[in-house]
Amino acid sequence: MSITHHPLIEEFPEHKDQLHALKLNDAHFRRLTHEYEGIDKSIVRAEQGLESANDDYLAELKKDRLHLKDQIFEILAQ
């Protein structure tokens, strides 16, 4: 199984400039992206065995990451 990060810039390459501008100017968006990045890092560390996490917890983290990604996309699509 390949273990990779899911950075927002790779998830939404067509919104690169908008991602940057919103991170600088929108506190709510910045909080969402910060939370997304933290969860993404936790998932990768757990998958690499650097953090202990059972399967249920890892699945919850992945759901949380997906939910945040959806929220971020909704903002980008406006």
Image (tube, grey):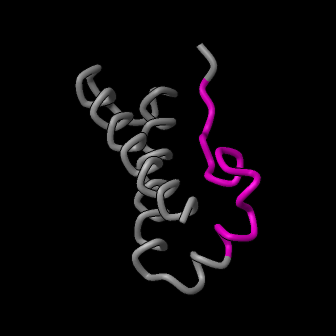
Give coordinates of residue 39: x percent, y percent.
41, 48
56 horizontally vs 61: left or right: left
Give coordinates of residue 23: x percent, y percent.
57, 76
Vertical comparison of 76 with 63: above or below: below
Quadrant where the N terminus sits is: top right
Give coordinates of residue 53: x percent, y percent.
30, 29
Residue 52 or 5: which is nearer the viewer? 5
At 46% from the left and 71% from the top, the residue drawn is: 29
Residue 27 or 18: which is nearer the viewer? 18
14 horizontally vs 11: left or right: right
In reply to whether residue 4 is colored magenta, the answer given is yes
The residue furthest front is: 78
At 75% from the left and 70% from the top, the residue drawn is: 17
The image shows a total of numbered marks equal to: 0
User: Main SS of the magenta segment?
Assistant: helix
Vertical comparison of 20 with 12: above or below: below
The residue furthest top is: 1
At 56% from the left and 86% from the top, the residue drawn is: 25
Vertical comparison of 33 with 14: above or below: below
Residue 38 or 17: which is nearer the viewer? 17
In reply to whether residue 8 is colored magenta, the answer given is yes
Q: Which residues are magenta?
A: 3-20
Question: Image quarter for residue 16?
Answer: bottom right
Vertical comparison of 59 with 51: above or below: above
Residue 65 or 12: which is nearer the viewer? 12
Quadrant where the C terminus sits is: bottom right
At 47% from the left and 57% from the top, the residue drawn is: 74
Give coordinates of residue 59: x percent, y percent.
31, 27
